[in-house]
Amino acid sequence: MKNLRLPAFLLALLAGLAFAEDPEFSAADTAWMLVATGLVLLMTPALAFFYGGLVRSKNVLNTMMMSFSALGFVAVAWALLGYSLALSGEGNFIGDLRYIFLNNVGLENKGAIASITIPHLLWMVFQGTFAIITAALVSGAVVERMRFPAFLLFITLWSLVVYAPLAKWVWGGGFLADLGAWDFAGGTVVHINAGIAALVAAMVLGVRKDFGRQAILPHSVPFVLLGAAFLWFGWFGFNAGSAWAASTSAGLALANTILAPAATIVAWSLIDLFRTGRVTAVGLATAIVVGLVVITPAAAFVSPLFALVMGAIGAFPSYYVLLWRARSGLDDSLDVFAAHGVAGMTGAILTGVFAQESVNGLFNGLIAGNPAQVLIQALAVLIAVAYSALATFVLLKLVGAITPLRASAKEEGLGMDVTQHGEEAYTSGEGAILVRSEAPLPAGKPKPAGGTD
């Protein structure tokens, strides 16, 4: 009798059935976390569209490339070293090297969090998608003037030196967790961190050459709205996925991720109507992001009613900081500080106000009789701000000593797409470059039709 050889797809199916019966794993939790990981990864291309629409047409490819490059450079840095620094060991400040080069990261579920019921490898990848989007967020402050090689070096180092330690302090059993600070899905680790880094980067690089001299307008508002829509969609994985299971906490986080931005849209629109008599599309898209950021640290810690309250409150500080920035000499190009840094601080503090143990099963905030939680949250915010600011400043100076941070005035005037990538986003039907330049083309590339010598 011939030996029976099962088709590959049947072997895979049987392996999956065996996995589902493994008491250490939950098939439902694993399935949800697979989806959530994909949703969070989607946020980075969504951010590319959001940011890309906000810049001028001569810089759109460069701006989008900054987000897309994080999918490679930060992901590799996370897998090889960042994950081990952020989520391993018993130390209060930094992880050990037990997971370096993905050593000991397999399909078992013995990861940094003993209670998780998903494969360790999936846990590592899910956490890595947070590192990717955080680094990409910072790019919004330096678009239209930072050289691409310098940006690549900066975000790679930043993900290891700034993001990983802060993730350890909050999520990896570090000293902020021991202090009693709570951050469900990244208000501190992701948004305050990125917002402060963006503010420092904008100050170090200085203003764009046209800043304050002429209006710098979005080249594609539909891109901005498209990006905001997909960011919101991806945020369901970001917040609800941070429950790490297909659970009631995930359901609460998802509901709050719908309700809080909805309230921010209403509040932001009313402020706009009161101030200017109209609601802008870019303003509405910004409101969505602000509301999402505000609810992120509290996503499964507060009731849906208080999620609405948080979303409405969160509109005010970000809106008025954005107005202040526009009137100041600070060129945070795409208002990362107002939309992420300020909104992240607002959300972190309000988590300490509105959290209820009857909802989250873990801790109370001010309204439930624990005013000390507000002080703890505020202290965590101050520590995150101080570390991110100092470490980002030092890193930028280090990168600047290795390679120039900033494009020349001529390169900036011609556009970062041509000068950094040798490409342009919009060409004629015949393939001729519409916005002609004197920028050198890559070796071997013919000059555009009608180009000058």
Image (cartoon, rainbow, N blue to C red):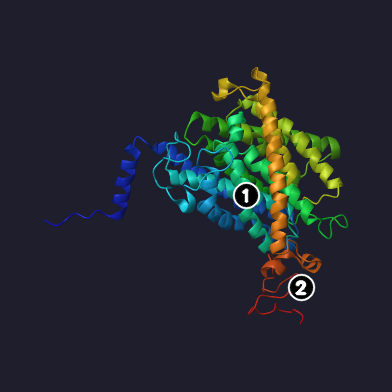
Q: Is residue 252 left or right of residue 405?
A: left
Which residue position is annotated with label 2?
Answer: 437
Residue 227: % across, % down: 65, 49
Q: Against 415, is 27 above or below?
A: above
Q: Against 13, is 250 above or below?
A: above
Residue 383: % across, % down: 69, 37
Mark 1: amino acid: Val
Q: Which mark is residue 375?
A: none
Q: Is residue 24 visible?
A: yes
Q: Indicate the quadrant containing the C terminus: top left, top right, bottom left or bottom right.
A: bottom right
- Between circles 2 and 1, the one closer to the viewer is 1
Instruction: Pick out the residue farthest to the bottom.
Output: 453
Mark 2: amino acid: Ser
Residue for point 71% across, 38% down:
343
| Element type where label 1 sits in the image | helix
Quadrant of the rendered structure where residue 73 is? Answer: bottom right
Q: Is residue 133 left or right of residue 15?
A: right
Residue 31: % across, % down: 43, 41
Q: Dot 2: within a 10 Å radius of its alpha carbon, few (fewer than 14), some, or many (20 or more) residues? A: some
Q: Indicate the quadrant containing the N terminus: top left, top right, bottom left or bottom right.
A: bottom left
Q: Is residue 308 visible?
A: no
| Element type where label 2 sits in the image | loop
Quadrant of the rendered structure where residue 252 is? Answer: top right
Mark 2 or mark 1: which comes first in sequence?
1
Q: Which mark is residue 161?
A: 1
Residue 419 or 162: which is nearer the viewer? 162
Quadrant of the rendered structure where residue 407 is? Answer: bottom right
Residue 435: % across, % down: 75, 69
Q: Against 111, is 451 above or below?
A: below
Mark pair 2, 1: CA separation? 38 Å
Q: Is residue 101 left or right of residue 68?
A: left
